[in-house]
Image: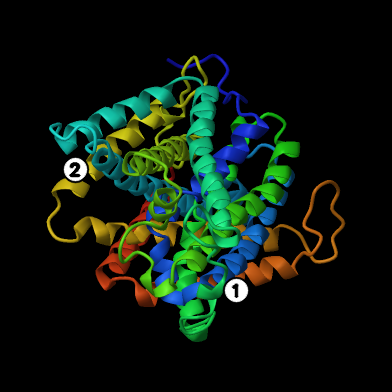
């Protein structure tokens, strides 16, 4: 199954990279979970998203510079390890891998529930199995197939958001049919723009920062991107502005159309707008959009998990068995191994009693933040202040990276104090097991 030349194929084009990053950040949360952040901060949540967007922009710029300085890197864990050492690379790789395995399990469980909307007599476990097999087959094929699939799945989400922005904007500014223009009075009529004060903004930041998780997927494509020295910096610059457009504008329209304290109490704001303008079959349309959103996240997760395990194996931090590539230059062994753990995750999601799976899902919150923190720390250590750097580089170094690091650390502390204790303990146990594994491997000389 292995190829003669063990190198990943550079089959991902610039348009694929942009959509992979957008698709990773714009998940089902914007369609069904936006009410949680709005209820925490009111209309002022728009400011939270803007601030978080700038922080993420600094992180992405740091990632792009690290990628340019390390052209041999295949994934973002390689960027971290090259600067912060083998232990940090080992920890980042495995913690991020577990993050994506859990996210995949959650998204596939959700996808089966959305599919049951049309196939009510088919059991959820069978739908989950079929979805997992389908995504696995897509990822076993050449990487360009993955890129095209993710491109069109993300395009569906972007199209729906664009339609929502246009129709919602029309309802706000000019009205529609018998509905007069709403205007922006709802932004201030219900306790002001910041009804819950600075505390509300701070509380919403925990939700908002995690909402952008997945944008760092650009760093997972380094070994399979055509002309990465040009594509990665351009993607890092552009993606954050597009993410802000497709997050901030819809949220601004939502809190303008609907009083913030009523968002989520009746039906989705997307359903409200589409119903108002007379679009038929709204329930089915939104179910389809949510299905594509979770399938996109699961597809991206399978790609990320397989590449992480592959690069860990290349560095001797996982069995070399997983470092083999197929004829299509795909790490099939790493892919199938990651998929096997995915089955376990789906089983836990469906059959675990109480909130067991909910507790495990605290780990991805830490996983995304830890990855961003380590990327920023690596960037700060990668060059000295005042050092001359050729080609693409962060001109405001080190100020923006320090600003991002402080904000991320503050968010991390906030998650520790606001997450369920059992979930935090589960994440800590996983982290300690990874650390112990590294120490044991060092002791055994492997």
Q: Position of residue 428 (x, y in %)?
A: 34, 65
Q: Mark 1: few, some, or many residues within 10 Å (few <14, many ≥20)?
A: some
Q: Which mark is residue 176?
A: none
Q: Residue at x 53, y 45 (%)?
A: 163
Residue occupying the far front of the picture: 178
Q: Which quarter of the figure has residue 35? A: bottom left
In the rendered structure, which disc, 1 or 2, sits on the residue that comes first in sequence? 2
Q: Residue at x 38, y 51 (%)?
A: 271
Q: Mark 1 = which residue? A: 406
Left/right of residue 210 with respect to residue 61 in the rendered view: left
Q: Position of residue 126 (x, y in %)?
A: 18, 31
| Viewer-proximal residue among 150 and 195 | 195
| Viewer-proximal residue among 426 and 88 | 426
Instruction: Kindly state the secondary structure of the residue where label 1 is placed.
Output: helix
Q: Residue at x 15, y 52 (%)?
A: 352
Instruction: Kindly state the secondary structure of the residue where label 2 is placed.
Output: helix
Q: Position of residue 234 (x, y in %)?
A: 73, 43
Label tally = 2
Left/right of residue 224 with respect to residue 395 in the rendered view: left
Residue 95 in sight in this render: no
| Viewer-proximal residue among 262 and 243 | 262
Asked if residue 355 is positioned above or below residue 403 in the image, the reply reads above
Q: Mark 2: few, some, or many residues within 10 Å (few <14, many ≥20)?
A: some
- In whole angstroms, how far apart are the C-alphas of marks 1 and 2? 38 Å
Q: Mark 2 = which residue? A: 347
Q: Which quarter of the figure has residue 232? A: top right
Where is the C terminus found, in terms of image quarters? top left
């Amino acid at each position: 199954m292995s190829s003669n030349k063990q190198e990943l194929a550079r089959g991902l084009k610039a348009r694929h990279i942009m959509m992979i990053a957008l698709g990773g950040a714009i998940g089902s949360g914007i369609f069904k979970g936006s009410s949680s952040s709005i209820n925490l901060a009111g209309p002022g949540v728009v400011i939270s998203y803007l601030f978080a967007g700038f922080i993420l922009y600094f992180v992405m710029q740091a990632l792009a510079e690290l990628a340019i300085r390390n052209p041999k890197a295949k994934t973002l864990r390689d960027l971290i390890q090259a600067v912060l050492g083998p232990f940090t690379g080992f920890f980042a790789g495995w913690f991020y891998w577990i993050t994506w395995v859990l996210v995949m399990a959650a998204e596939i469980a959700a996808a089966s529930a959305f599919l049951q909307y049309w196939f009510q007599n088919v059991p959820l476990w069978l739908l989950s199995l079929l979805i997992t097999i389908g995504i696995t087959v897509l990822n076993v094929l050449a990487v360009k197939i993955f890129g095209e699939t993710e491109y069109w799945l993300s395009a569906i989400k972007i199209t729906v958001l664009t339609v929502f922005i246009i129709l919602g904007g029309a309802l706000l500014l000019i009205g529609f049919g018998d509905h007069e223009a709403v205007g922006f009075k709802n932004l201030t009529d219900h306790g002001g723009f910041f009804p819950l004060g600075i505390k509300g903004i701070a509380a919403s930041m925990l939700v908002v920062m995690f909402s952008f998780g997945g944008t760092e997927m650009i760093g997972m494509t380094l070994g399979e991107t055509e002309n990465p020295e040009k594509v990665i910096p351009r993607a890092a610059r552009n993606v954050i502005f597009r993410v802000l457009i497709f997050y901030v504008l819809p949220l601004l329209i939502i809190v303008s159309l609907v009083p913030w304290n009523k968002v989520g109490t009746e039906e989705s704001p997307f359903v409200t707008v589409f119903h108002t303008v007379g679009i038929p079959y709204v329930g089915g349309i939104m179910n389809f959009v949510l299905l594509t959103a979770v399938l996109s996240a699961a597809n991206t997760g399978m790609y990320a998990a397989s590449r992480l395990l592959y690069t860990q194996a290349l560095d001797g931090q996982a069995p070399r068995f997983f470092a083999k590539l197929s004829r299509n230059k795909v790490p099939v062994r790493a892919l199938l191994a990651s998929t096997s753990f995915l089955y376990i995750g789906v089983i836990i999601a469906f059959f675990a009693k109480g909130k067991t799976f909910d507790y495990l899902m605290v780990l991805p919150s830490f996983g995304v933040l830890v990855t961003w923190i380590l990327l920023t720390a690596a960037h700060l250590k990668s060059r000295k202040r005042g050092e001359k750097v050729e080609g693409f580089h962060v001109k405001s170094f080190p100020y923006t990276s320090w600003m991002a690091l402080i904000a991320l650390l503050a968010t991390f502390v906030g998650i520790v104090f606001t997450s369920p204790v059992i979930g935090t303990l589960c994440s800590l146990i996983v982290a300690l097991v990874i650390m112990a594994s590294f120490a044991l491997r060092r002791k055994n000389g492997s």
